[in-house]
């Protein structure tokens, strides 16, 4: 891209000019009409999810390149599909842009989106562009799932083990390092890089679904409760319990943490990052104990049983060694868009 084009602003080429630029990121056989037509397989259910990201709230030029912002936006939606047990079919992208934003920034954003989607054989199949005082990115993702394999928050039952598919707190730590590069002096370069990548390039856990269904094949009628941990591990467990009408006992020492935390954060800081940091995009699932153990062993790499579903409605953080008193977890301790 020559220097003259790199400084072009959206207002210089207008809506149609921008759309013409962005259409090259989409399959030509799908776009061009008033709506996209997506073919699903027989006996499959369509799953739809929408996520909105706002400049200054969900991404920032200080911590996130346009490519990373695009990747994160796509990953958030794919993670929602994974949390339902669904595989992606395509996404649409709605953009609200100031006229002064550079065209090259928008193209780089789309490059990041497509880099994430390509890993899962998924495409941008449509969208819209409008003028806005603040950059806003709204993505709607479409997926399909066998009706017998839909994961719902409401299916947890007393006795279930609570499973996480990977470590928690890495994304929050990566953001902290980006905002304060002077921190974490004892971290190795590889550890620092891994934590930053966890924030800038999170991985939606679509890869665990085939493993889950392989483990559950003899029990395919068994309902699975779960959701993703994009708003934090504590939030996910509380939300599942609230909808299922149950409580949970979360074991403090069984929560999977990045190894880098051992020589950087205190135990309390590490736990706060894991419970309330958010944007780790792991799955939190409730399974019978025997199946949960097999699932965790198969996954490895940070997967763990972190607690169990119990009667009642309270989610308690417990220390089996009794060094710390029981703590009741609540949604108010995590990030809230309209909180004080």
Image (cartoon, rainbow, N blue to C red):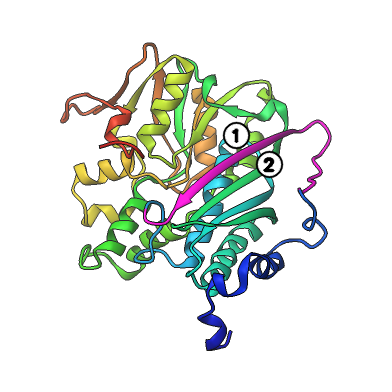
Residue, x 63% and y 45% (percent of image)?
141
Q: Are marks 2 and 1 in contact (CB under 8 Å)?
A: yes
Position in image of residue 287 (x %, y %): 52, 26
Does the segment drawn in magenta span residue 72? no
Q: Is residue 277 left or right of residue 244?
A: left
Q: Is residue 191 visible?
A: yes
Residue, x 68% and y 21% (percent of image)?
221
Specify start and end residues of the magenta stretch as a single range.
35-56
Q: How many marks?
A: 2
Please identify the quadrant where the C terminus is shown: top left
Q: Which mark is residue 19?
A: none
Location of residue 39 (image quadrant): top right
Q: Which residue is more in the foreground, 126 or 196?
A: 126
Position in image of residue 231 (x %, y %): 40, 40
Q: Which residue is more in the foreground, 333 or 132?
A: 132
Does the segment drawn in magenta span residue 36? yes
Numbered disc 1: secondary structure: loop
Which residue carries the number 2 mark? 143
Q: Which mark is residue 84?
A: 1
- Between discs 2 and 1, the one toward the N terminus: 1
Q: Is residue 207 visible?
A: no
Q: Which residue is more in the foreground, 264 or 52?
A: 52
Location of residue 215 (image quadrant): top right
Position in image of residue 319 (x %, y %): 24, 28
Looking at the image, residue 69 lies above or below residue 57: below
Location of residue 140 (image quadrant): top right
Please identify the quadrant where the N terminus is shown: bottom right
């Amino acid at each position: 891209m020559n220097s003259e084009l790199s400084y072009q602003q959206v207002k210089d080429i207008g809506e149609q000019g921008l759309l013409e630029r962005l259409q090259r990121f989409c399959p030509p056989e799908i776009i061009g009409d008033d709506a996209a037509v997506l073919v699903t397989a027989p006996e499959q259910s369509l799953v739809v999810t929408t996520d909105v990201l706002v400049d200054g709230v969900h991404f920032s030029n200080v911590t996130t390149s346009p490519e990373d912002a695009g990747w994160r936006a796509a990953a958030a939606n794919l993670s929602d599909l994974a949390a339902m047990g669904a595989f992606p079919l395509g996404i649409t992208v709605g953009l609200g842009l100031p006229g002064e934003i550079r065209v090259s920034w928008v193209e780089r954003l789309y490059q990041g989106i497509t880099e994430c989607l390509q890993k899962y054989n998924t495409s941008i199949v449509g969208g819209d562009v409008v003028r806005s005082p603040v950059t806003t990115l709204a993505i709607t993702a479409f997926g399909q799932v066998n009706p017998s394999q839909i994961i719902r928050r409401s299916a947890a039952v007393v006795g279930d083990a609570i499973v996480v598919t990977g470590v928690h707190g890495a994304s929050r730590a990566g953001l902290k390092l980006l905002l304060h590069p002077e921190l974490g002096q004892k971290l190795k370069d590889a550890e620092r890089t891994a934590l930053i990548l966890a924030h800038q390039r999170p991985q939606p856990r679509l890869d665990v679904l085939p493993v889950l269904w392989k483990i559950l094949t003899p029990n395919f009628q068994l309902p699975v409760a779960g959701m993703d941990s994009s708003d934090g591990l504590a939030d996910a467990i509380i939300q599942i319990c609230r909808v299922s009408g149950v409580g949970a006992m979360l074991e403090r020492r069984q929560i999977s943490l990045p190894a880098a935390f051992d020589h950087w954060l205190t135990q309390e800081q590490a736990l706060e990052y894991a419970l309330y940091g958010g944007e780790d995009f792991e799955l939190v699932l409730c399974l019978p104990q025997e199946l949960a153990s097999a699932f965790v062993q198969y996954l490895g790499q940070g997967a763990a049983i972190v607690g169990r579903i119990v009667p009642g409605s309270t989610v308690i953080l417990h220390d089996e060694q009794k060094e710390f008193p029981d703590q009741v977890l609540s949604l108010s301790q995590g990030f809230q868009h309209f909180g004080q």
